[in-house]
Image (cartoon, rainbow, N blue to C red):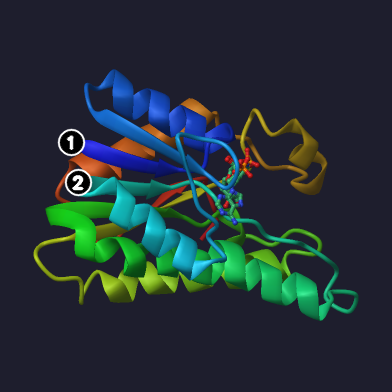
Amino acid sequence: MKAVVIGTGTIGAAVAETVAAHGHEVVTVGRKSGQFQADLADLASLRRLFARLGSFDAVACAAGEVFPAPFEQATDEQWADSLASKGLGQVNVVRAALPHVTDGGSFTLVSGVLTDEVTPAATIGATVNHLVEGFVKAAATELPRGVRINCVSPTVLTESVAYHPFFPGFTPVPAAEVARAYLRAMANPVTGRVLKLHKTDS
Ligand SMILES: NC(=O)c1ccc[n+]([C@@H]2O[C@H](COP(=O)([O-])OP(=O)(O)OC[C@H]3O[C@@H](n4cnc5c(N)ncnc54)[C@H](OP(=O)(O)O)[C@@H]3O)[C@@H](O)[C@H]2O)c1
């Protein structure tokens, strides 16, 4: 399998390492980092990226930003940038890459625990994560040629210590465990699934 991993940070680096360790070819992409560059918020840059990469079997996205703020203080820019980056940005990854992915290939996107749990100032993050998960479930019914699409939904990561104060009472998950969920989505015949790396009471 040739896998394109977008995002070279905490999750992306772990995904690239895990996928490569299982014998697959990995191409890394970042906005400024990685072997290739593209900006999720810039559809033209995504189209250029996938045209350059040729054919591949999987795209794993571990990128995209959310700019959280208390609801009444959130600016137009915070809403627009969050939706354009982690939200529509991941939708556009799929739209731009679809012509180049092999038959039976896969997309694995990222959402997060805020789809199921609330924390202070979580509205933008929750909205963006629901956008991603809703897209995944609906697109799974429409993608052609046996192409699959899934989503990984982690809670806060063990390694992301700067975020821990914003997730009081949450049990962090290690990046390696999140990366195994990506590999599970990429290497097995599942589609339309949200693989949750967190426990909820519902
Ligand atoms: N960390 C957590 O606790 C956690 C929990 C749940 C969900 N998530 C989600 O998982 C994703 C990755 O999180 P992370 O902690 O691994 O992030 P990270 O360590 O900050 O790394 C982010 C990576 O994404 C790339 N990136 C960011 N914005 C981009 C854009 N507009 N276009 C292209 N690449 C972009 C960055 O590239 P450059 O460095 O080149 O700019 C970087 O490689 C995010 O969507 C986040 O919301 C994270």
Residue 151 lies left or right of residue 85; in this view the side is left
- Give, as a three-letter code, the residue at label 1: Met
Q: Is residue 102 above or below residue 137?
A: above
Residue 120 placement (x, y as % from top left): 81, 61
- Give, as a three-letter code, the residue at label 2: Asp
Classed neighbour count for the residue bearing mark 2: other residues with Cα under 10 Å, few (<14), some (14–19), many (≥20) = some
Quarter residue 83 falls in: bottom right
Residue 40 placement (x, y as % from top left): 53, 60
Which label sits on residue 57? 2
Instruction: Name the residue at 31% across, 24% down.
Output: 20
Can residue 202 be seen from the camera position used here?
Answer: yes
Q: Which of 27 and 156 is in front in this view?
A: 27
Q: Name the residue under label 1.
A: 1
Q: Are marks 2 and 1 in contact (CB under 8 Å)?
A: yes
Residue 131 placement (x, y as % from top left): 50, 73
Instruction: Name the residue at 25% across, 29% down.
Output: 25
Q: Nearer the viewer, residue 24 or 28?
A: 28
Instruction: Name the residue at 84% across, 76% down.
Output: 75
Quadrant, the N terminus: top left
Residue 25 lies left or right of residue 199; in this view the side is left
Between the residue at mark 2 and the residue at mark 1, the CA separation in whole angstroms equals 6 Å
